[in-house]
Amino acid sequence: MADNDKNPQAGRDRDCIDSSCEMLVSPIPRVRPRPLAVTGAPRRRRVLFVNSGKPNSDRILELAGRALADHGVEVAEPLRKARASRLADPDLLDRAARDDGLVLFAVNDWGSCSSSSSLDAIDLQRRGAAAGLVVTGPFSGVMTEHLSAWLPDRPIPLVVIEHPIQDVGEEELRARAAELARAVLALLDQATAMPTPNA
């Protein structure tokens, strides 16, 4: 009789690649992140966009920046990631961490770019910067869940705009930019009620 006939689990053990194998080790060691103290309030009424480089991000951020400036928000010259689906370069993160405004990684409209930007924002939060990200609707739920896994003491700034941002016309881009500007204004207004970092 084959080993697998004696023990039906034996064959499964070698092939299992999902959580159904967790019965084999008890308990499985888990790496838990240290709790994250979120900086929600920037030091100035200012925003720095870190462009993900996705198609139409340039136009959306340009239009949103104009709208924010019309409302008295200081808008920094955007930074740009080398690749949307990868973590930002260390030099870029260093520059963003030194900014005293709200840093938003934008616009993320797919899984890999949303994930990498969320990790970039967490990196800056651990350095004490007010950082968050902008995603489109289909990715808001999973990003909310992902960000909460880092045990933040308050929600990490997450702006959600309508999907898609690619293959749409100027009218749709203007609508998404207006949506983004309204959300950023709301974040900045909420921040005025928060204690400033190192206060």
Image (spheres, helix red, strand yellow):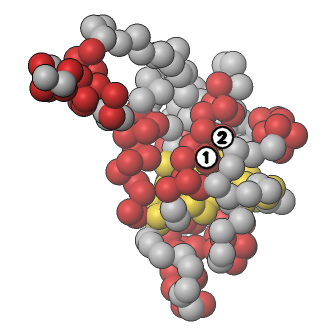
Q: Is residue 124 left or right of residue 175?
A: right
Question: Looking at this view, is 25 or 166 the one in front?
Answer: 25
Residue 108 at what x, y percent from top left? Answer: 57, 60
- The correct choice, above or below, for 3 with respect to 95 in the image is above
Q: Amino acid at mark 2?
A: Asp
Task: Report the Cα–Cα distance between label 2 and label 1.
Answer: 6 Å
Q: Quadrant location of the N terminus? A: top left
- The correct choice, above or below, for 107 with respect to 95 in the image is below
Q: Is residue 161 left or right of residue 72?
A: left
Q: Residue at x 42, y 29 (%)?
A: 149
Residue 63 at what x, y percent from top left? Answer: 67, 76
Q: Residue at x 69, y 19 (%)?
A: 198
- The correct choice, above or below, for 34 with respect to 57 in the image is above
Residue 111 at what x, y percent from top left? Answer: 50, 56
Identify the disc placed on residue 116: 1
Q: Quadrant location of the C terminus? A: top right
Q: Is residue 33 left or right of residue 69?
A: left
Q: Amino acid at mark 1?
A: Ser
Q: Nearer the viewer, mark 2 or mark 1?
A: 1
- The correct choice, above or below, for 38 with respect to 68 in the image is above
Secondary element under disc 2, as helix, strand or loop, is: helix
Q: Is residue 161 left or right of residue 133?
A: left
Characterize the local packing of mark 2: few (<14), some (14-19) or many (20 or more) Cα atoms within 10 angstroms.
many
Identify the disc placed on residue 120: 2
Instruction: Determine the image quadrant of residue 167.
Output: bottom right
Identify the disc placed on residue 150: none
- Check if mark 2's residue and mark 1's residue have beta carbons within 8 Å: yes
Whether residue 73 is visible: no
Characterize the local packing of mark 1: few (<14), some (14-19) or many (20 or more) Cα atoms within 10 angstroms.
many
